[in-house]
Image (spheres, grey):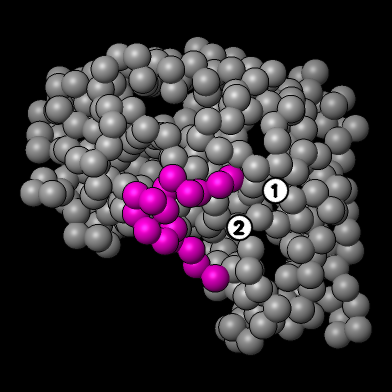
């Protein structure tokens, strides 16, 4: 490739910032769009563009030369926000790609497949979303495919690492210092997780091979597959080393207070969406990455021990000698 400039839409967000840093580390010129009123991160490797997404003309001029656009924008986690804002955000991203002649890349998720999804998800697995968020996701991908820009969706499981805003920090790790692990589902159900820096590096690898792609492509990122029990096994030695529990103790297992969330959903719109997506914790699933690996080779994959250590450090949870807290067993295959 001769053109190595990428525009990240929503570069101040969790995935957007991770993607921006991954592209910059790979030698790309990175343009980071963010809201005009947003705080600008201190990262000299990124050229920040505090321009409103809907100011297409100004943003296009500022992003001249970008051959890839990463759509990392997300509305608030409510059904209403996704229904009203999701299509408009996609329209704006598509308009930019048309004017720039760029490839559009979107981080997808597994909402598309619904509660009847099989244990292993492939790009061709039938999509049967029964939730509002899943139906919106299907529509956005269809919108992206139908308009005629070159598009790539890379689908993954839940994020961890890189900061705050996902189940890992909002639930699993939030009470670790109190000696407890709060988990949203049964202990024995396997679910898919994406360590955010690995997913961001995957976007770079696919972008660098975009000339080989069909006009619209979907890839699955496998990441790590973990049960609640596996999280507990990994975190117990760390909890002892950090002094969150005594040397002869284990972390207490706490279930997500779904009954409270059900009652609160009458007044908290976000909790409506949480309830609708609860099935993800009760339905075993993993993503098959055969197609991705055929394109890029080995999927970027940080060993789980290292990924977990860095994720906890990102949250400010580990003390100065945290490296010794990560046990050898944490490095077993996903």
Note whether 109 is above or below 95 in the view shown: below
Task: Quadrant for residue 236, please give it.
Answer: bottom right
Image point 91% across, 84% down: which residue?
A: 248
Who is closer to the viewer here, 315 or 60? 60
Image point 63% across, 28% down: which residue?
A: 113
Note whether 299 is above or below 10 in the view shown: below
Q: Position of residue 291 (x, y in %)?
A: 44, 45
Q: Earlier in the sequence, mark 2 or mark 1?
A: 1
Task: Quadrant for residue 311, please give it.
Answer: bottom right
Circle 1: element type: strand
Image point 51% across, 35% down: which residue?
A: 123
Who is closer to the viewer here, 79 or 155? 155
Q: Residues within 10 Å of mark 2 (few under 14, many from 20)?
A: many
Q: Where are the magenta residues, as a range?
A: 287-303
Q: Position of residue 17 (x, y in %)?
A: 38, 49
* Residue hosting label 1: 191
* Residue hosting label 2: 224
Q: Position of residue 274 (x, y in %)?
A: 72, 31
**Left or right of 326, for residue 57:** left
**Left or right of 110, for residue 144:** left
Would you say residue 292 sits in the magenta stretch? yes
Circle 2: element type: strand
For the C terminus, the image quarter is: bottom right
Spatial distance from mark 2 to mark 1, Cα to Cα? 8 Å
């Amino acid at each position: 490739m001769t053109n190595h400039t990428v525009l990240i839409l929503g570069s101040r967000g969790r995935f957007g910032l991770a993607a921006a840093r991954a592209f910059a580390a790979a030698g790309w010129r990175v343009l980071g769009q963010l809201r005009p009123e947003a705080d600008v991160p201190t990262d000299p490797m990124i050229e920040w563009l505090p321009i409103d997404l809907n100011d297409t003309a100004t943003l296009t001029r500022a992003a001249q030369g970008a051959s890839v656009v990463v759509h990392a924008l997300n509305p608030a986690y409510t059904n209403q926000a996704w229904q009203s804002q999701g299509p408009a955000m996609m329209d704006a991203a598509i308009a930019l790609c048309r004017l720039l002649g760029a490839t559009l890349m979107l981080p997808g998720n597994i909402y598309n497949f619904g509660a009847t999804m099989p244990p292993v998800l492939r790009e061709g697995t039938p999509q049967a979303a029964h939730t509002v968020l899943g139906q919106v996701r299907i529509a956005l991908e269809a919108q992206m495919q139908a308009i005629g820009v070159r598009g790539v969706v890379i689908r993954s499981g839940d994020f961890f690492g890189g900061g705050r805003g996902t189940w890992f920090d909002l639930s699993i790790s939030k009470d670790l210092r109190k000696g407890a692990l709060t988990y949203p589902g049964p202990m024995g159900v396997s679910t898919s997780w994406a360590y955010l820096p690995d997913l961001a590096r995957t976007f770079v690898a696919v972008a660098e091979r975009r000339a080989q792609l069909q006009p619209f492509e979907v890839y699955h990122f496998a990441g790590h597959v973990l049960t609640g029990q596996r999280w507990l096994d990994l975190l117990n030695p760390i909890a002892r080393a950090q002094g969150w529990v005594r040397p002869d103790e284990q972390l207490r297992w706490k279930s997500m207070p779904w009954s409270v969330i059900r009652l609160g959903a009458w007044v908290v719109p976000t909790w409506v969406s949480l309830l609708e997506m609860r099935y993800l914790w009760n339905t075993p699933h993993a993503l098959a990455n055969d197609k991705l690996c055929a394109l890029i080779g080995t999927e970027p994959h940080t060993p789980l021990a290292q990924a977990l250590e860095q994720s906890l450090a990102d949250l400010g949870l580990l003390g100065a000698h945290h490296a010794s807290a990560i046990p050898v067993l944490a490095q077993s295959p996903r």
